[in-house]
Every structure is written in structure tokens, then in C-alpha cells.
Image (tube, rainbow, N blue to C red):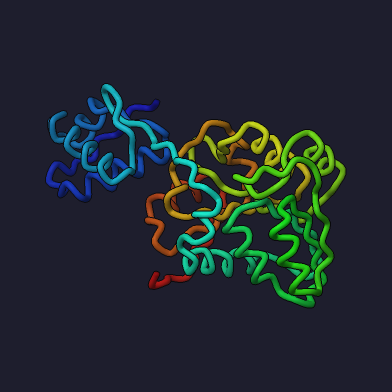
Amino acid sequence: MAKLAPTVDRNALPEERQQRILARLRSEGRVVAAELAEAFEVSEDSIRRDLRELAAQGLCKRVYGGALLPAVTVTPLKQRRTEHPLRKQALARKAVSLVKPGQTLLIDAGTTNAAIAAVLPIGAGLTVITNAPHIAQLLLDREGFEVLLIGGRVVASIGGAIGAQAVEQVKRMRADLCFPGACAIDAAHGLWGFDSEETLFKRAMIDASDETVVVATDDKLGAVAAHQVAELARVQHLVVEHSADRATRAAFAAHGVMVHRAEAVSG
């Protein structure tokens, strides 16, 4: 990792310093306490206190000598369907603003992607390819969409089909936009998934599409998971919540990703 340039701001408040540390962490994936102490011209004890406070908020994972990005945890699908509906609806509205009439969309399983399907414009001549029976049925109930359902082994915890059969079907298709479910995404290493087979399916979606749109709640930004889906260069658009901090948005934008910020919500 490149050495941090001195900040020449030893009078920065702890909260300001922590935000800068967090931006560095989300950009590089790791930070070293000794290097941070030199850069901010403060003691390593002060940096360790900063890292402890960031870790207490779930924003980093402390390790010997520094900190790493946190790993997101898997929440059961049934629970995710009831979590933060207004936030997901705001993300969905912003994501759908990227869709043009007549396009073919590849939509992965997931509760945020279901919110996207629920607000796709009727009468726009859209074709939707999905591995999620719930999303397919949602669109059939709304009418006005051409729906293609990817088959194969449906995993209850994912809510969609994955595995070799699903991957082979996607490889024979072509889409204008794809919306892979985001388990985690960070500016240094790109998009991550929890399950190895699910990761292969998401990767096939990206390979079969002209552009990739990742829609991520705040907890998935700057986090990592077990399996890398794709490097950030394969992601053209990132849709984030209104509450996503400026440093995080800037870290993704610096890598050429178009960052779209959803409207603020009260819940």
C-alpha cells in the first residue's frame, strides 16, 4: 500500500480524522496504524482509539497493527423482505431512471431488485430476464412485460436459481443492463458475493450484459464477502442511498464508476 501523504492537520477533530481514515479504508481495503499516525501527526494511541470507535460502529474490523474492511453477514431472505422498505424503494426509483424503453434487463434475485421490478415502467417495451420466481411473478402480475425465467436449482436462502444450468442459460443471452444482487462492494476490489455458485451466476450476468448497475444499501458499501464477483472496472453504475457519505461516493467515482444518489427518505 502506498504511504500516506502528511495531512498537515494535527488539529483535526477526532470525528474528522475518523472520516478520513474511513475514506482511506474504503479506498484501499486496509489501513496501518503506524502510517496513519505519521500522516495525521498524532500518536498511535490516538489512531487506535479512532479504529476502536470505527469498529464499534461496524465500519471496520480491527486487526494487529491496523484495520480491514468489515465483512457483511448473511441475513435470511424472509427477514430481508421486511427490512427498510422505504430505503429500498428510493434506491429502486433511482435505479429505474437508468432504464430506457425497449431494453432487455437481467435482474438477479434479491429484495432490492424486487423493489426495482415493482417500479419498472409499464408500456416501455421492456424484456426482463430473471432467475427469481418472485420477481418473474411480480412482473407478470403487473402485465406489459416480456418475462424470461432462468431455470435450474432454486435456493431458498437466495430466492433464485443458481448452478450450472442457470449459468449456461445466461451465457446464451444478451442484455442491455444487468442488476446483479450486491452482497458487498468496495472501491479497491469491486463486487463480492457470499456463495460460490451464486457468484458464478452474477459473473455470467455481467458477461452477458452491455452495462452493469449495482444497487447497494449503505451497509454493503466498503465491505467485502467471501467471493469476488467482478473487479470494479466491470461496474458502470452504482446506485447508493442518499445517506452514503461523500468520501465513499468519491472513492467509487475516482475509479470511473457513475455514482447515482437516491432521494432522502424518513425511514
Q: Position of residue 238 (x, y in %)?
A: 56, 54
Q: Taking 4 as reference, is 249 above or below it?
A: below
* 75 relative to 34 in the view: left or right: right
Say which quarter of the image contains residue 1.
top left
Say which quarter of the image contains residue 149.
bottom right
Which quadrant is home to the C terminus?
Answer: bottom left
Q: Nearer the viewer, residue 14 or 110?
A: 110
Question: Which residue lies at the image location 74% right of the left edge and 35% below the top edge?
Answer: 163
Question: Which residue lies at the image location 52% right of the left edge and 53% below the top edge?
Answer: 216
Q: Nearer the viewer, residue 215 or 147?
A: 147
As drawn, the residue found furthest toward the right would be 172
As drawn, the residue found furthest toward the bottom would be 123
Question: Which residue lies at the image location 53% right of the left edge and 61% below the top edge?
Answer: 260
Q: Position of residue 68 (x, y in %)?
A: 36, 32
Q: Taking 47 as reference, is 13 above or below it?
A: below
Question: Which residue lies at the image location 61% right of the left edge and 53% below the top edge?
Answer: 110
* 33 relative to 95 in the view: left or right: left
Say which quarter of the image contains residue 44.
top left
Q: Position of residue 182 (x, y in %)?
A: 56, 47
Q: How many marks?
A: 0
Q: Position of residue 192 (x, y in %)?
A: 56, 38
